[in-house]
Amino acid sequence: MARHGDDTGMARTARLHARRWAAGTLAALALAGCTPSGFPPACPQLSLIQNASTLVQVAGKANQRDIRDLVLAARIEAVPASCNFAAAHAVGAQLRVHFTVERGPAATSPDVQLHYFVAATEGKTILDEKDFVVKGVFPPNADQMTLVGEPIHFRFPVGADQSAAGYHIYVGFRLTKAQLDYNRAHGI
């Protein structure tokens, strides 16, 4: 009679089968990540453009610092993205841009239009660049709100020597030269 803790032949066989099953399962999972039926693919890198993730609109001269001249201040807060296999040799990336918007004392309308862009690159080459506008209306007695842009889709070719992680997606406001100069001057 085997006592608790004894290593019987049946126990050894069960452990051996468990190890083989685990090793086979891990190998299958590793290979599944390379096919459309496995894990989600790698996504392209995603970055906000320095000095273009904040938009400040002021009445009068752009270099004024008086809070009474602020029309609007907006920030890109988040860009959630997901990727999936779009075809045997392509990865689809979907994203939406989230904004926070603050209405300033110099605002004359509750209506807001934010112009922004999303660009896909490979190295230093721009593969695609799209312009968007997100619109909103401040509710009565509110000076802050959040907005979410429309869904944006990109498709990236992939293969044995090219992962979607080799691409880059950049997001930023479409700024005027004066707005960009303001952001740079104020470290925004």
Image (tube, rainbow, N blue to C red):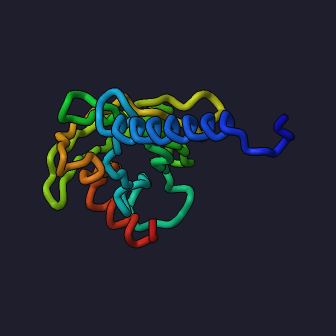
Q: Residue at x 35, y 44 (%)?
A: 42
Seen as rendered, the residue at the extreme front is 1
In which quadrant of the rendered view does residue 122 lie? Answer: bottom left
The percent position of residue 145, horizontal first and vertical second, equals 57, 37
Q: Is residue 90 above or below residue 127?
A: above
One can see residue 20 in this view: yes
Q: Is residue 55 above or below residue 115?
A: below
- The quadrant of the image that shows the N terminus is top right
In which quadrant of the rendered view does residue 128 lie? Answer: top left
- The quadrant of the image that shows the C terminus is bottom left
Q: Residue at x 34, y 58 (%)?
A: 49
141 sits to left or right of 116: right
90 sits to left or right of 5: left
Which of the two residues, 87 or 75, is positioned nearer the viewer here?
87
Q: Residue at x 38, y 69 (%)?
A: 184
The percent position of residue 33, horizontal first and vertical second, equals 36, 38
One can see residue 97 in this view: no
The percent position of residue 172, horizontal first and vertical second, equals 34, 51
Which of the two residues, 75 or 73, is positioned nearer the viewer here?
75
